[in-house]
Image (tube, grey):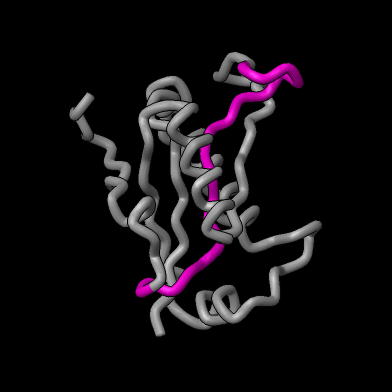
Amino acid sequence: MKYVQYIIVRKDLVPIMGIGKTAAQVSHASLGAVLDKGQLLDTPEVRGWLAGPFTKLVVYVKTKQKLLNLAAKLDELGIRNKPIYDACRTKLEPEEPDGSTLTCVGVSPILVDDTPKCLKTLRLLEGDDDDD
């Protein structure tokens, strides 16, 4: 069986965050999606993913609202996901009342064959995308 983890990034923030900060946010999302209160999730999907090649797809949406809509859709489908909020101590301006900004969402590993259309249709985040 093949498992995959999706990390969805807000593309509107990538030019502001730069490559390094974007990579850090993606890393937070990947870990956050497989941990619960500091403990590794004990699900068949997480165990299968950890036994395999740790396949990750870093994809994007263009706006905060699209990321929020996607996270809500994943919740409706029963797919665990973890929104990542940056503390805004370096490059980003706060968007939330608590002084943070939503940067990405990590999705718990899923079977490739069970990947919903809302994830399959997203494009990979590339350093040279110029489709906006």
Question: Quadrant location of the C terminus?
Answer: top left
In-front residue for pair 79/88: 79
Would you say residue 20 is visible in this rendering?
A: no
Residue most toward the left? Answer: 131
What x and y, as percent, mark residue 58? 39, 50
Question: Quadrant location of the N terminus?
Answer: bottom left
Based on the picture, tell me whether residue 101 belongs to the magenta stretch. Answer: yes
What x and y, as percent, mark residue 57? 38, 56
Residue, x 39% and y 24% (percent of image)?
12
Residue 115 appears left or right of 83: left
What x and y, as percent, mark residue 77? 52, 58
What is the quadrant of residue 131 in the picture? top left
Whether 62 is drawn above or below 51: the answer is above
Residue, x 76% and y 21% (percent of image)?
98
Residue, x 64% and y 33% (percent of image)?
85
Whether 11 is drawn above or below 116: the answer is above
- Give the extent of the magenta segment: 95-113
Residue 9 appears left or right of 80: left
Residue 99 appears left or right of 105: right
Whether 78 is drawn above or below 14: the answer is below
Would you say residue 83 is visible in this rendering?
A: yes
